[in-house]
Image: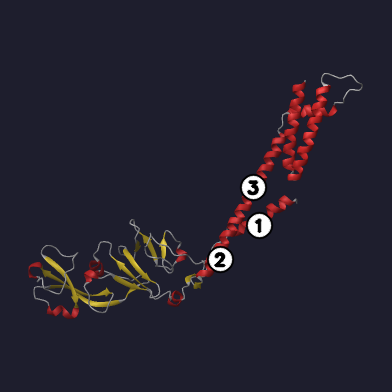
Amino acid sequence: MTFSEQLITFMFIFCLPLLNASEASQCSSSSCGYRNVDVRFPFWLFPKQSSTCGHTGFDLLCTDRHETALKLPDTEPFLVRDIYYDKQRFRLNDPNNCMARRLLSFDASGSPFSPLHFLNHTILIYPNEDIKSSSHYKPIRCLGNSTSSFFAILFDFASSMPSSCQMVKTLLLPVSSPIAVDLNDQDLWLKWDSPSGRDCENNRSLRGFENNTTIEVKWFSSFKSGIHNFVLLMMKLICLSLMTLLFGITTCVVYVTFSFERLPTQIRRSLARHATLKPPRGRARSPIFGPYKKVMNMREVRSLRAYSDVNTASTSNASILGYSCVVLARFVETVHKSK
């Protein structure tokens, strides 16, 4: 096996596995746009990230307005406003600005999330003409019609409402505080218990699956993983550069070789005839021999000098062969002109 063949074999054996190598198994954070919610493990952003970058049920998506959204089972998407990874909770909002209506039918079953608190509320319908402007109860703005309004009050205060109020139902509503607040001004706060990563967040480490075939969560040093990915990228660039250079050299050698083999047959025959020519004896000078000899002397000197320079500058057989072809072609052309 020649040196060039050994070099090509080494390049493929060394570089191909490196080019197929993956970065550290944890995924970097992503977002739907500038100054948007930072999405990282256990959440993952579809379709910007692979499902292996997050936990099951923690998939988020981007809206047409480049906002981060969460789609829970059997519900319309919620907008994600904040994610507190150290506290393992996040804040949701309704795209239509009617969170109170969403809370009346909210159901987190089938997802890994749960509300922070529940309070028992009673839903009432109250005629609009009986509503007092001084009342501390606020109607749900996105519900009701021109004749009546809807109220959501704590169950303990339902008995104090006027008799004109009609009770619709009583239910537990998810709230962000154990203290009663106006549902019109409330966002939905959810939390998750598993996977847990509070200590990891406090240590400023990254979390992710140990590999793509297990669900075991592992902590990664963000500094070490950054160095690993940088070194891997540099080695990939070096390998690609070397393979490109090797391909270019091989192409040049093949081009020069085929160019020489395709020299016109007439030039080859002329070179063969020139090799059999012998100078005439005596003082008689042929009309061709005089200029022929001068041409030979000048061409030989130039060819030897050129050959010496090329041989000193490069030992490449392809370069010497190509240069010799040019010199011989010019020489044959001069011979034909002299005739």
First reached walking from the N terminus: tag 3 or tag 2: 2
Residue position marked by numbered label 3 in the rendering: 247
- Residue nearer the viewer, 164 or 318: 318
Percent position (x, y) of residue 240?
60, 53
- Amino acid type of disc 3? Phe
Residue at 63 percent of width and 53 percent of height? 242
Residue at 70 percent of width and 37 percent of height? 258
Residue found farthest to the right: 282
Percent position (x, y) of residue 137?
15, 73
With respect to residue 20, does 263 lie above or below? above
Dot 3 and dot 1 residues touching (CB under 8 Å): no
Q: CA distance from mark 3 to mark 2?
A: 29 Å
Residue at 66 percent of width and 57 percent of height? 13
Local SS, label 1: helix
Residue at 18 percent of width and 81 percent of height? 156
**Left/right of residue 270 with respect to residue 68 in the rendered view:** right
- Residue nearer the viewer, 287 or 19: 287
Neighbourhood count class around disc 2 (C-alpha, 10 Å): few under 14, some 14–19, many 20 upward = few
Q: Can you see residue 263?
A: yes
Q: Which mark is residue 13?
A: 1
With respect to residue 193, does 57 lie above or below? above
With respect to residue 117, does 56 lie above or below? above
Number of the front mark, 1 or 2: 2
Percent position (x, y) of residue 277?
85, 26
First reached walking from the N terminus: tag 1 or tag 2: 1
**Left/right of residue 70 with respect to residue 164 in the rendered view:** right
Based on the displayed image, in which of its 4 quarters is residue 106 positioned? bottom left
Residue position marked by numbered label 2 in the rendering: 228
